[in-house]
Amino acid sequence: MHPFYHYNLEDFLTDDDFRGWVKNGQPRNDFFWAKLRSDYPEKALLMDQAAELILTWEKQPSDLTHEELDHEVNRILNDAVRTLPERKTRIIGLRWWYAAAAVLVLVGLGWLISGDYAFPKSTYTYQRYVSASPVPLKEITNKSQKPMKVSLPDGSEIQLMPNAAVSYAPVFVQNHKREVYLSGDAFFEVQKDKANPFFVYANDLVTRVVGTSFTIKSSSERVEVIVRTGKVAVMQAKDLADEKSRVEMLLTPNQQAVFTSEKPVLARSITENPVAIAHPVAKPDFTFDNQPVGEAFKLLQETYGIPILYDSARLENCYLRVALLDESFFDKLGIICSTIEASYQVTDGQVVITGQGCE
């Protein structure tokens, strides 16, 4: 079910499609919003008040003083209070409207002063994804204090973190896609299906996989995609519709992509605590007895799946005599580099080793 039944004034004010319809009269939305008024007649008054507020805030700061804005907001809200029919409803509504008026005046002033009337910077939100779905969605919300296991129709599984939510179509494969909409944090284990790629929409990032495991952490300010196994492609939601110029970032195990509203570009890096990727063989042995350093770098790369670049010719005379046990990836790397008097740098999700070589 779409969330419009629960919409209050703030929800209409922050709905991108509603604002666009009010400000620009977009024809494609005329039928949609008219049908909403018909389906939820009790929301018609809120829609009218929200529209009037949006048009008020659209005035340039030079055309509208703070006092005028305050007057306009109170006039609109007071008109709404007077139209409420029953005395009991009017008393409850009056308290709510007064509180809303105080908040909206402050927020409205902030938008005008900043010169940004666009409300939240991101237009790609969980609420918008769900409301725009052409088919009814099933929503699951984790209201507990521990992870919740969610089994999808294709056999894929989600560990849904507290306060997170997912929505998906009960008929899961639509147009050769498996699509999930995420709010909050979750760990995915996706069943492999090359014919029907798996998409996760989390605010400004879209994650595309065939079959793998990964974590997504999403909030209004930041989205992270952290790969556990396999390969994952991520892209900005705004680029999804343009297949020709679409740019996807490919992530491999222990790599992550981060997108923030403050810096809206994709950045690839190595996870803070890389873990060994699963192997059917015994636990790798990091004991080196006078062995070429290249063997250590190769074992690290195979164990953690993280690319390690170095000048093999320059480091060909470097040998290791060291026993590494349960140290973390970066601790192992640091010990190895210290032993051969080299250094490392993490760049674009890979490790670059630099050193003068060994005599």
Image: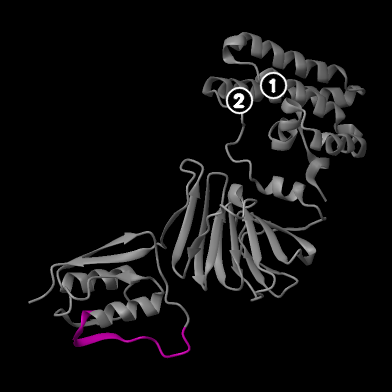
Graded by Cα atoms within 10 Å as few (under 14), some (14 to 19) or many (20 or more), the crowding at tag 2 reads few
Residue assigned mark 2: 107
Q: Which residues are magenta?
A: 279-293
Measuring from the top left, give residue 225's x and y in whole percent: 52, 59
> Does the rendering let one see residue 109?
yes
Give SS at disc 1: helix
The residue at 22%/71% (across/down) is: 311
- The C terminus appears in which quarter of the rendering? bottom left
Q: Nearer the viewer, mark 2 or mark 1?
A: 2
Q: Amino acid at mark 2?
A: Val
Q: How is the image coloured?
A: one colour
The quadrant where residue 150 appears: bottom right
Q: Are marks 2 and 1 in contact (CB under 8 Å)?
A: no
Residue 218, image x, y percentages: 57, 52
Q: Amino acid at mark 1?
A: Ala
Q: Residue at x 46, y 85 (%)?
A: 279
Find disc 1 in the rendering and name its residue.
101
Compared across the picture, whether 137 is left or right of 147 comes to right
Identify the residue at horizontal 77%, vertical 28% (top origin). Answer: 25
Q: Earlier in the sequence, mark 2 or mark 1?
A: 1
